[in-house]
Image (cartoon, rainbow, N blue to C red):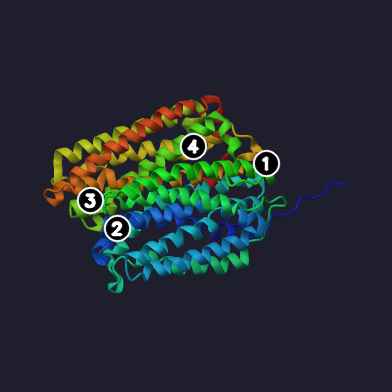
Amino acid sequence: MSSVPPVPDRRRWLALAVVMTASLMDLVDVTIVNIAMPSIQRETGASFSQLQWITAGYALAFAVGLITGGRLGDIHGRKRLFLVGITGFTLASALCGLATGPEMLVASRVLQGGTAALMVPQVLAIIHATFPAEERGKVFGMFGAMVGLGAVLGPLLGAVLTEWDFLGLGWRPIFLVNLPIGLAGLLLGLRYVDESRSPRALKLDLLGMVLATTALLMLLYPLTQGRENGWPLWGFALMAGSVPVFGLFLAYEKAKVRRDGSPLVELSLFKVRSFAAGIGVQLTFGVVMGIFFLVWTLYMQLGLGWSPLRAGLTGVPFSLAVSAAAGMSVQKLVPRFGRRVLQAGAGVMAVGALLYLAEASYYGTAIHPWQMALPMVVMGAGMGLVVAPLTDAVLSEVPQEHAGSASGLVNTTQQLGVALGLGLSSVAFFGVVDAGGPLGLAFVHAFTHSMWWVAGGLAAVFLLMFALPGRGAAASAAGGAADRELVSV
């Protein structure tokens, strides 16, 4: 007697809408803040280092909490952690919108990043528990479209909300807009998302998380604050001290493997050459993105004197090019050409950065938005060729049993790269602004100096990609590892 397969619950699509909306809220929140930075500085009197921490604090808290957030979901329930995360994210957004000064805003952004680290890792696990395997391809296609929407929506929404100045609130609505979305996600999640747990959840590695966070703060805090404090000796001592703390973290992780097999970082993964190189690619690419997006919006608004809306519209060609190239990369190019597509993307993006640098130097403060369109399209197309297939290419030679922890580590590394890039902006951008000269020209010179850093970082990404799998492995990765790609978002 043949058994009839169970009919999937129709509510699964409502559950998908809930978790996708929460992910969109996180994606938009990253890009929406950059465009409002000059307005935040004017209204709060934030220093340049505080502006860096408004974005770096979020990225750092998000990065160090991702792996632990995923394991908490395995142990205590994915739905429960998702609801805790979206509740915390919504409350943190309210605190950001009500911040009385830059110190409170930085602290609230750190809290926002930490709660996002509880919310975002549950999305993949909830989809796995909710959808049968034959439907996941459609689900991931929808998720990819949502990522493209977030890339376009974030800067535009941030520009409109900032320039609209609703009820005289200035930049605050960019955070307060999360309140109705988060509340709706919480109520609908309670009703439509089913609970699930891992039957073999690992133990938490809280000490490992503390050591990793301490080492990162010892590196990033003086890097971000050093310029403002005149690069004091204690800053260099802290940065140097981060090296032995990182060493202690690695030694503890090795001991944790021997003791109970549940380290924060699975060190055996680094024996896979493509994974080790891929971590370097993700870290360097994150540094490039951290530098570019912050200095780009400050250059346009503080240096050129453009409004938030004008600056936001300037980024639309970039976002559209990313979306178009990403879809073509995964569906048509990578299955045929493999790793060369990713290398071409890094090369094209570097060409776009050099083109932007040349135009900014030539036109100076007289540059117009339409003159930025070409370098933005070139950079966006290059980025689209890289970001969509990169995670699968990095993970294609990783044993299947380690795919989950490897995916989390890849995404964590990229977020750490972003935080490091934001810290390096002190040297690449703000140090040049401090050198003096007419305000507009000082920002132009700082921007072109930063674009050399961006181009150099992309050249390093290109070279590191030689260690990634070639055509065959990358093609199979593009076709058969869509599950892992979702984790990397």
The kind of residue on which mark 3 rests is: Met
Q: CA distance from mark 2 to mark 1?
A: 47 Å
Q: CA distance from mark 4 to mark 3?
A: 32 Å
| Residue at point 27%, 55% (across, down) | 48
Q: Callout 4: helix, strand or loop?
A: helix
Residue receiving disc 3: 300
The kind of residue on which mark 4 rests is: Ile
The answer to whether marks 2 and 3 mark residues whose Cβ atoms lie closer than 8 Å is: no
Q: CA distance from mark 2 to mark 3?
A: 11 Å
Label whose residue precedes the other's in the sequence (4 or 1): 1
Q: Which residue is at the front of the view, 149 or 458?
A: 458
| Residue at point 15%, 38% (across, down) | 362
Q: Residues within 10 Å of mark 1 (few under 14, many from 20)?
A: few
| Residue at point 71%, 50% (across, down) | 200
Q: Callout 1: helix, strand or loop?
A: helix
Residue receiving disc 4: 279
